[in-house]
Image (spheres, grey):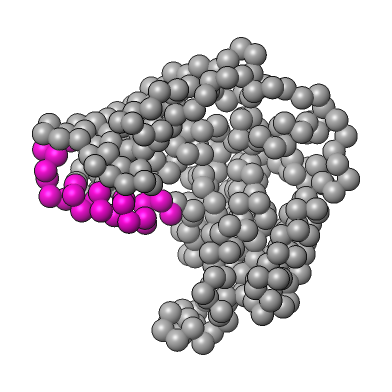
Amino acid sequence: MTTNRRSFIKNSSALAAGLGFSSVISANTKSTVSNSHAAKVNIAVIGVGMGCRDLQGALTNNPWVHCLGMCDVNKQRLEEQAARFRKDFPEQTSNLQLYSDFRKLLDNKEINGVIIATPDHWHTYIFAEALRAGKAIYVEKPVANSIEECNLMLDLQKKHNGIITTGLWQTSQKYFRGANEILKTGVLGDVYKVQIWLSQSTEPRAGAEDAPPPEYLDHEMWLGPAPKRAFNPNRYRGWRGFWDYGGGQQTDWGVHWIDSAFDGLQALGMSNREYPESVYSTAYRHPKTFNETPACQTTIFRFKDFHLEWSQQVAHLYNRNQGVAWIGSRATLVCNRDGYE
């Protein structure tokens, strides 16, 4: 794979002009699926680590959904997951095929939609290729590693009317829905600040020596559009801690909490997810850690009538290791996956 991220984005206008999208689920098919489940929908997953969690949710209690393809550069993990799904969902995986190259999977015209759950640095490229192949897309969060890539993906979706969704499911949970109903009552008074946070250790992560990649891993394909470099087991397993592949905790857990914060702000009628007026961020990275991304970080997104603050730190807030707090003139509402108060 010779395309790097910089050249991919540089050539994005040519790519966008060449992409075509033909809806794989017509209006009649969507109606049939939603009303009677008589139609069969064929899906595939690209990246079987996190992707198989998403796949399991798609297949469970949905006998009309079939998995026709699994793709991963780690042959060992791919075969293990395929064996598990063939055992647990035998009828829905009866025509399952395994791939090491996502482009060959996308050539399968029987596949209607794909789950993209690779490391983040691959998302934009696979997204574009999936649109060109006429697939509906579920892309894991964060959708991409830069604003530039996100804007390109938005342009492609609008241009080709793609059927797209992303893995921001947290706000659908009952506690967050309940918190939004409380916010609508106005009991908090004037909300001027929203705080979101994640507590974790700042201990340095141990390094590892570069080594030959294991035989079951196609390391060149794993790197894809990222800069070419030798295999390192800690970079491979902990890729979110390195700028070539991810953005640390702010683009991992932070994405969920930012989404929940804005969901609440929309319930308050205060925001339609517009861009902030300014952003300030400061961070700490232990000098001996192997990771490139910070262990502690504070980012303040300033809007016209409020500001949103992300904190990645050691201490818990409101006796919770992570969460969102809408802070008002009369009260504060705190919520996470364990409940709200």
Q: 320 and 73: which one is in front?
A: 320
Along the horizontal axis of the image, is 184 left or right of 113? Answer: left
Residue 193 seen anywhere in this rendered image of the structure: yes
Q: Quadrant of the C terminus?
A: top left
Q: Which residues are magenta?
A: 169-191
The verdict on residue 171 being magenta is yes
Q: What residue is shown at x 43% (from left), y 79% (from top)?
A: 34
Q: What residue is shown at x 81% (from left), y 24% (from top)?
A: 209
Along the horizontal axis of the image, is 111 left or right of 306? Answer: right
Eyeballing the image, is 301 above or below 79?
A: above
Q: How many marks?
A: 0
Residue 115: image quadrant is: bottom right
In the image, residue 99 lies at what x, y percent?
77, 61
Q: What residue is shown at x 12% (from left), y 45% (from top)?
A: 186
In the image, residue 318 lies at what x, y percent?
30, 31
In the image, residue 177 lies at what x, y percent?
29, 54
Q: 72 and 164: which one is in front?
A: 72
Eyeballing the image, is 324 above or below 127?
A: above
Eyeballing the image, is 115 above or below 310?
A: below
Residue 107: image quadrant is: bottom right
Q: 286 and 125: which one is in front?
A: 286
Along the horizontal axis of the image, is 213 left or right of 165? Answer: right
Magenta segment, prevailing SS (helix, strand or loop): helix
Q: What residue is shown at x 53% (from left), y 64% (from top)?
A: 57
The verdict on residue 321 being magenta is no
Residue 68 seen anywhere in this rendered image of the structure: no
In the image, residue 18 lies at what x, y percent?
63, 59
